[in-house]
Image (spheres, rainbow, N blue to C red):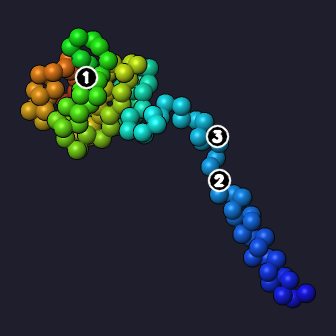
């Protein structure tokens, strides 16, 4: 009887632990905007993304769109990936794939902005310098 209890408790604990280790379906269903490769989520509203970045206290925010108004292509993504500093905190593809929203805690170098502008329309939605400096 004693050996049965020694086996029963660990076995019961193992079964209870294993049953609780599955994925939470509510969490899986709560992220419908995640792409299968997980690199960028696509949302429908760049204005909401701007608000989210401001809420996240990212003072430097830029909207990047193709000059022809078309969808951001894979070549555009490669170009932006190569020309974007690693310090950029956040990037989101928005407006049904037509706008990239970049957010940063750091000043984006003017050379980077020039590189982006050579191929895209760039809108600066950053906080004013006085708000950033606390003036």
Residue identifier under label 2 = 22
CA gap, disc 3 to disc 1?
A: 33 Å
Secondary element at tag 2: loop
Residue 93 - label: none
Give the residue displayed 38% in from the left and 38% down from the top: 39
Q: Is residue 24 visible?
A: yes
Give the residue displayed 58% in from the left and 35% down from the top: 30
Q: Position of residue 115 (x, y in %)?
A: 11, 28
In contact (CB < 8 Å): disc 3 and disc 2 = no
Q: Position of residue 65 (x, y in %)?
A: 26, 19
Q: Quadrant of residue 47?
A: top left
Give the residue displayed 72% in from the left and 69% down from the top: 14
Q: Earlier in the sequence, mark 3 or mark 1?
A: 3
Q: Between 55 and 113, which is closer to the camera in this rendering?
A: 113
Residue identifier under label 1 = 64
Give the residue displayed 80% in from the left and 84% down from the top: 6
Residue identifier under label 3 = 26
Secondary element at tag 1: strand
The quadrant of the image that shows the N terminus is bottom right
């Amino acid at each position: 009887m004693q050996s049965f209890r020694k086996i029963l408790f660990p076995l019961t604990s193992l079964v209870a632990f294993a049953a609780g280790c599955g994925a939470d379906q509510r969490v899986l269903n709560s992220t419908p905007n995640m792409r299968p490769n997980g690199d960028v989520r696509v949302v429908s509203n760049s204005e909401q993304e701007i608000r989210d970045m401001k809420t996240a206290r990212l003072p430097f925010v830029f909207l990047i769109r193709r000059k022809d108004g078309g969808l951001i292509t894979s070549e555009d993504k490669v170009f932006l990936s190569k020309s974007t500093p690693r310090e950029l905190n956040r990037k989101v593809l928005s407006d049904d794939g037509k706008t990239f929203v970049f957010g940063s805690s750091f000043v984006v170098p003017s050379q980077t902005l020039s590189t982006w502008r050579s191929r895209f329309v760039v809108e600066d939605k950053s906080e004013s310098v006085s708000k950033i400096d606390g003036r």
